[in-house]
Amino acid sequence: MKIKTGGGKVVDMVVQYETKVEGHWKPVVRYDCSHGFFQRDAIYPSGDKEKKAIPIEDLDAALTYAEQDIRGRWEFYREKHKRPKK
């Protein structure tokens, strides 16, 4: 997790869940705002990504959303990661 703040507010962030596959840590799901909007990438073993914009503009709220989603659904994301992208 990387969080950048300014004036007491989140101005940039990355929240990522990783899992160990064959002795190596691999990204599974990542939330960030690197494209100018808050979004989630589901990442497959092939490196393919499934990108989804999340309509939350306040990054403080977006950070809370990302943390809660990953904590609550990490098992779902891990299983999804194992399947090929459709």
Image (spheres, rainbow, N blue to C red):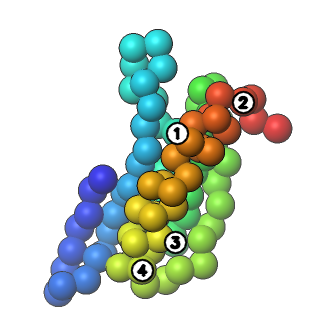
Q: Quadrant of residue 40?
A: bottom right
Q: Observer-nearest residue: 37 or 69?
A: 69
Residue designated by label 3:
37
Q: Position of residue 6 (x, y in %)?
A: 19, 80
Amino acid at the residue labelled 1: Val
Residue designated by label 1:
28
Farthest top residue?
A: 22
Which numbered mark, 3 or 2, is in the foreground of this view? 2
Q: Verify CB contact (< 8 Å) between mark 2 and mark 1.
A: no
In the image: residue 1, left or right of residue 42: left
Q: Residues within 10 Å of mark 1 (few under 14, many from 20)?
A: many
For marks 3 and 2, give the CA distance: 27 Å
Amino acid at the residue labelled 3: Phe
Q: Earlier in the sequence, mark 3 or mark 2?
A: 3
Amino acid at the residue labelled 2: Arg
Amino acid at the residue labelled 4: Ala
For marks 1 and 4, give the CA distance: 22 Å
Which numbered mark, 3 or 1, is in the foreground of this view? 1
Q: Earlier in the sequence, mark 2 or mark 1?
A: 1
Residue designated by label 2:
83
Residue designated by label 4:
61
Q: Secondary structure at mark 1?
A: strand
